[in-house]
Image: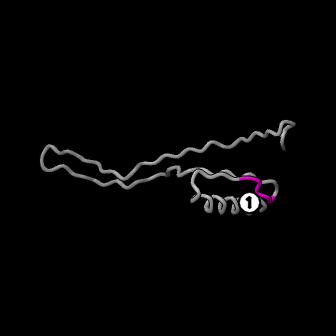
Amino acid sequence: MLDSLGRQSLESKSVSTTSTPDHAVVTQRTKGPATIQKVAAEGGKYCGFGVVIEDGSTVEGKSFSAPSLEPEILERLHKHSSNAGR
């Protein structure tokens, strides 16, 4: 609902993520060669954001940090909306 000046506020949950890239751990030995152990990447990284403003089932506005994110975000939004009614 808009106020008398046409403003609206929006609150959202905070989201955080952690990630570790591919890397190697080197262990020095007192005798013999050092050992190298490869460690795979893990975790997740932000790739951007998307905002979709709806009034009922009508999309009033949308914005994405990268156009390539739009299909995935809209698909997730649609799945979330479908599951909310269950």
Residue nearer the viewer, 73 or 34: 73
Q: In this image, 83 relative to 44: left or right?
A: right
Q: Residue furthest right?
A: 4
Q: Position of residue 49 (x, y in %)?
A: 60, 50
Above or below, 2 against 44 in this view is above
Residue 53 is situated, as x and y percent measured from the top left of the image, at 74, 51
Looking at the image, residue 82 lies above or below residue 65 = below
Q: Quadrant of the N terminus?
A: top right
Estimate how packed mark 1 is, as few (under 14), some (14 to 19) or many (20 or more) residues with alpha carbons within 10 Å. few
Q: What residue do we see at 80% from left, 59% from top?
A: 57
* Residue occupying image coordinates x 84% and y 36%: 5
Observer-nearest of 58 and 14: 58
Q: Main secondary structure of the magenta part?
A: strand
Report the residue marked by disc 1.
81
Residue plotted at (74% across, 60% down): 81
State whether residue 50 is above or below residue 71: above
User: Which residue type does callout 1 highlight?
Assistant: Ser
